[in-house]
Image: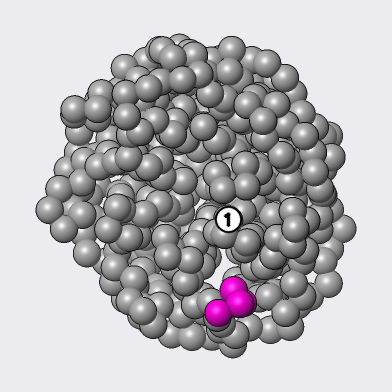
Amino acid sequence: MRHSAHPLPTHRARRLARRLRGLAAGCAALAAAAAAFAAPAAADETAGDAADPAPVFVQNNEPDGNAVIAYERAPDGTLTQRRTYPTGGLGGVLEGSVVDHLASQGSLTYDHRTERLYAVNAGSDTITVFDVAGDRLERRQVIDSGGDFPVSVAVHGDLVYVVNALDGGSVQGFTDRKGHLVQVPAWHRELNLDPTLTPQFLNTPGQIGFTPDGSKIIVTTKGNGSNILVFPLDKRGGPSAEPVVNTFPGDSPFGFTFARSGRLVVAEAGPNAVATFDIAPDGRVTKLSEELTGEMATCWVVRTGPFYYASNAGSNTVSGFRSVEEDRLRPTGITPTAPGTIDASVSSDGRHLYVQTGGEGTVDAFAIDRGDGSLTPVGSVPVPGGVGGEGIVAL
């Protein structure tokens, strides 16, 4: 593993919003490409025994008009479609993608503190902010993402950060001022990824997220360097001038979540594995353990309590794990889904897992056994315009 810090060039002008047609490749190709190069929001602990109905929100990422579809979640985990809410922006398609047009985790993010939902509009380079009331949304704001093709957004306190995928990639920070999101120009950082690498969906950032204590932001770069970038934040929330670049050749780090201990847990599309990392105060990242899924295109990962669920787009499956000593992971089983297993979310009570399947544009619902973490199917619902769409939040 190599640690380094690279200076970031000045911000290039944002190109016009693009709509790209997917080519004949899926997320499964990411694993093969990463292997050749070498030669995913955690639910809190289960909240009591109550299982009150709550919504699930799904983004369809339609190029002609992005929208969030609201579903009512019944106590048994089944979903009923309620309403469709246009974001006021456009979806987008990364070149080469089929089942995962954004090729990212965290494109739809919920802030429990403010009860707001954040959605990326990749085709129009904007972020939409919704107020949430039950399964109803009210569009509050649409704001420029500060870059080209936003794919993932993260929230911590009054801070919001987005990662833009194209033109070399960039990070842009915002602050919440009395309920209004304000872009901070000084909080823009170029990622300096190679924009010439193809196909795009293999070589663009996978996710942005805050460490649990809010002191750093993390960005994964997938096949474009195979890096985990760490930006320490100052007291006001501004990022360091340069990231700490942690390189793991061939791993293609994609989606991530955090263990209860605060350790980083990453889905690695290269070896098709889920790995645990320690993040030092200076931003250096050290791999502690790695568990192979034995599946194809392991790209997304979510957590609830001691259980982790990794989506395998190339195998149409979910791999389950349980955290044991020192946050090492032990496999608990493999569960089939509809074609194109991608982004996922766990309900806030820890009882149900919801998995987007980009091949057919559905959400598959599973009951989680709170003793052993095993999954039991409880139904599937279509997502209007959802083929290749990404972004899901279960409350």
- Residue at image position (48%, 66%) is 214
x and y, in percent, of residue 323 in the image:
20, 46
> Can you say whether 189 is above or below 331 in the image?
below
Span colored in magenta:
235-239
Whether 88 is among the magenta residues is no
* Residue on which the image places disc 1: 154
x and y, in percent, of residue 92 in the image:
74, 44
**Count of numbered marks:** 1
Q: Nearer the viewer, residue 376 or 254?
A: 376
One can see residue 304 in this view: yes
Q: Nearer the viewer, residue 380 or 352?
A: 352
- Residue at image position (36%, 79%) is 281
Q: Secondary structure at mark 1?
A: strand
The amino acid marked with disc number 1 is Ala
> Can you say whether 125 is above or below 167 in the image?
above
Residue furthest to the left in view is: 325
- The quarter of the picture where the N terminus appears is bottom left
- Residue at image position (46%, 80%) is 244
